[in-house]
Image (spheres, grey):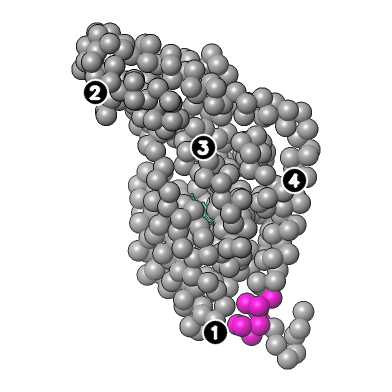
Amino acid sequence: MEVLVSGMRPTGKLHIGHIFGALKNWKEYQDKYKSYFIIVDWHALTTNYQKTQELQEYIKEVMIDYLAFGIDPNKAVIYLQSMVKDVAVLHLILSMIVPLSWLERVPSFKDQIKELGKDIATYGFFGYPVLMSADILAFNASIVPVGEDQLPHLELTREIARRFNYLYGDTFIEPKELLTNTPYIPGFDGRKMSKSYNNAIFIDDDEKTIKEKVMKYITDPNKIYKNSPGRPEICNVFSLHKAFENPETKEIEENCKKGTLGCVECKLKLCNIINNFISPIRYKRKQIEKNKDDVIDILKEGSKKASEIVANTLDKVYYKVNLKGNLIKN
Ligand code: TRP
């Protein structure tokens, strides 16, 4: 079975954007690949090192979201990055062979500094993609499902693998990205759904909250009256009907265009769809929350399994770079 690795930063509760951007696919992949899903808390530190008070809480919430959604620890290994410390050692060794110019070329470094401020212009954040490479190469993964924004990081991972293999002999597989077309998920202010924009519908939002949020969505600004014809192709609410694969999507599209469907009614339909989708997850979430310790046990168990694989990789790497040899064996 091919090995797949993916990760998510624990920056808070997960929302609908995460479902369509990752979780829905992960749930399928866990049946097809030997999957490792990482909660990358070291990566969270690279951008949020000044505010770590809630990190533990976030890790737990993300884990509950994964389990409630159906990521299954019997099928995939779910683990916490910081519990598998050998990945940091691999990161250190890889950092020796990565030319500065390669990292300077990665667009996310400059882009994120522009967006988040120069407080994140640190050594650790500069090395973000090397750490991500270590996450992937530690398992010799061949498949990495990521969003388009992560493609430069994956390209770098391949370059690092190639350079390591060139310097020390064949060791790492060059991993390939797995891009699935994910639908665009707008938040209720029309921008991309994101926790930091405060425009997200969370997996554990209750029915009332979902309704309040859905009612805020901006629809086609030209559709002034209930019976004005609308343009579904530019409507945020319509994007969501499509994403959730509402069986009425076609009808909604036609009736909106004709002006026989008003936005309020259309939004109420969407509330129903979202609720039907989320309510079993919300229910499962509540059940899981009752036994929080179990959640952490699952994470520890996964981290133990991951540690064994990574220790093995690191052992090979130590030999390759002559940190182990005739004299020093262990
Ligand atoms: N950088 C990824 C993101 O922000 C998260 C990540 C960390 C990751 N390590 C990874 C993704 C390894 C895939 C594989 O989305």
Q: Between residue 51 and residue 219, name the one nearer to us.
A: 219
How far apart marks 1 and 4 lie (CA) works out to: 36 Å
Q: Which residue is mark 3?
A: 19
What amino acid is at disc 3? Answer: Ile
Give the structural element (helix, strand or loop) at label 2.
loop
Of marks 2 and 4, which one's residue comes earlier in the chain? 2
How far apart marks 3 and 1 lie (CA) works out to: 40 Å
> Compared to 271, does 80 lie above or below?
below
**Circle 2 crowding by C-alpha within 10 Å: few under 14, some 14–19, many from 20:** some
Whether 316 is among the magenta residues is: yes
Q: Can residue 189 be seen in this snapshot?
A: no
What amino acid is at disc 1? Answer: Gly
The circle on residue 298 is 4
Camera-nearest label, 2 or 3: 2
Residue 124: image location, x then y, percent: 52, 58
Residue 75: image location, x then y, percent: 68, 50
User: Is 271 left or right of 66, judged from the image as shown?
Assistant: left
Whether 36 is among the magenta residues is: no
